[in-house]
Amino acid sequence: MPHEWKEALDQIHADEALKQRTRQFVQQNMARQRRPPAMRVVRRTLYAACACLAVCLLAAGYYLYFTPTSIISVDINPSLELSVNRFDRVIDVTGYNEDGEQLAGTLDLLYQDFTQAVTQLLDSETVQTCLARDEFLSIAVVEIDPQQGQTILQYVSSCTAQHRNAYCYSLAPEEAEHAHETGLSYGKYKAYQEILAYTDAYTPEQINAMTMRQIRELLYSLQTGQEPSAVTPSAGGGYGHGGEHGNGNGYGRHNAE
Amino acid sequence: MRSEQAVNRAIEQYADTVKRVCVLHLKNDADTEDIFQTVFLKYALSSTAFENEEHEKAWLIRVTINACKDLLKSFFRSRMVSLEDVRERAAVPQTSSEVLETVLRLPEKYRQVVYLPYYEGYTAPEIGRILGKNVNSVYTLITRARQMLKQALGGEEFAT
C-alpha cells in the first residue's frame, strides 16, 4: 500500500468536538428511548381516559338533556304532547291526531322554554278558534319529576285561568304508562279510562277522533244516564268530573263557572 | 440497549474508522456528522453481542457503509452532486494527497474495496462478509480498482 495513501487517510480523524457532540446525541436519544415506554403508556392511558371522559360527558349530557322529566298533554281537538326536560326545555312535540300533527307543524315549540311553548300553543289560532267555539281544553301534566310537574301545572293553570272550558290536572307516570300503546294522548287516555269504567263500547280510535268536548259529553251521559245529544254542553261544571279534578294528585282546577 | 460506558468506549475506539468510511462516501461535514452520530446511536441501541473487537469493528464499518448508502440514495433524487463537487468535500483534509483524491473519484463500489483491504487490512472473504458480496466479486472489484488507480496515477500501482 502506497505510503502516501496511508498518510492521507491517517489525516482523517474524528476531532474531540465531534466525539463530544456524538456522545451527547447518543445519550439524549438513549434517555428518550428509555423514557418512552412508560411515558407512552401514561400518555396513551391519559388519551384513553380523556376520550372515555368525553364520551361519558357527551352521553351524560345527552341523557340529561333528552330525558323528559314532565310531559304536557294538550287536548282540545288537536291533541299534542310536549316533552319537557329537566332544564324546562321542550325536547319533543308529538301530535296524537291529524289536527295535532298539523298544529305541531305550524308552531316552533322545540327547544323553547316550556312557558314560551305553552303560551305560544295556547295563543295559536287553532286553539283560540277551538276555545271560541266553546270547545273543552284539557291540559294534563305527567309528573315524572313531581316538583317540576307541579311548577308546570301551576303555570298552565294560570295561563288558562281566563278560559272557562279549560281543565288542568296532573297525572302520575304510572297512570299514563299505557296511553301511547292505545295511540291516545295522556289527556284523552285519562278520559278513556273513565269511560271504560262505564262501558267498553268505545275504541281508543273512536275516542281519539272525538274532541275533548265530545268526550266529556259522552262521559257525562254515561255518568248521568242521559243521551249524549241531550247533554247540555255548558261549560265544564256539568260534566260530572268536578270531583275528580286533580286526579288524586291533590292539584287541579276546573275553570267552570 | 448498551451502557453509556460501552458507547463512550466505542466512540473513542472506532471514531476515526467510522469517520474515514464516512469521508470516503459522503460529500460534506454535515452529512458526515449525521451519519457518524447515527452509527453510534445504532450501536447504542443494538443488542448484537460481539464475539471480539474485530467483529465489533466490522459491524460498525458495515453499519456505516449502509447508512452512507441510504443517505446517498435519498440524496440522489434531491441533491445530486457532480464529480467536480466531490473535490470540494469539506470532510477531506486540505492536505490530502493526490492518491486520496483519486480514490475519492472512483465509483463507490471501488472506493470500498480500496479502503477496506489497503487501509483496514481486511481479506477478500472478510470484505465479502462486510459488504454482503461474493468473494469472487470482491476480487474482481479489487482488481478493477487497482487498474483504475494505476491508470489514474500514471503507473503507480497499489500493491496487495
Image (cartoon, coloured by chain):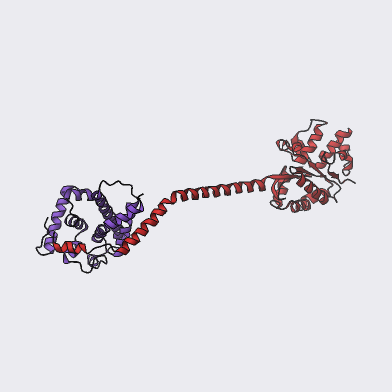
Quarter-of-image position of residue A96: top right
- Outermost left residue: B155
Looking at this view, is B92 or A138 the one in front?
Answer: B92
**In this view of the protein, can residue B68 be seen by the observer?**
no
Q: Is residue B109 left or right of residue B9?
A: left
Residue B99 appears at what percent x and percent y? 16, 64
Q: Which quarter of the figure has residue B82?
A: bottom left
Please determine whether, in this image, residue A204 is positioned above or below residue B16: above
Along the viewing direction, whichever of A94 and A230 lies nearer the viewer: A94
**Is A134 left or right of B66, judged from the image as shown?**
right
Residue at figure coordinates x 81%, y 39% from the top left: A215
| Chain coloured purple in this rendering | B
- Chain assigned red: A
Q: Residue at x 37, y 58 (%)?
A: A25
> Residue A148: where, in percent of width, then height?
76, 47
Q: Quadrant of the N terminus of chain A?
A: bottom left
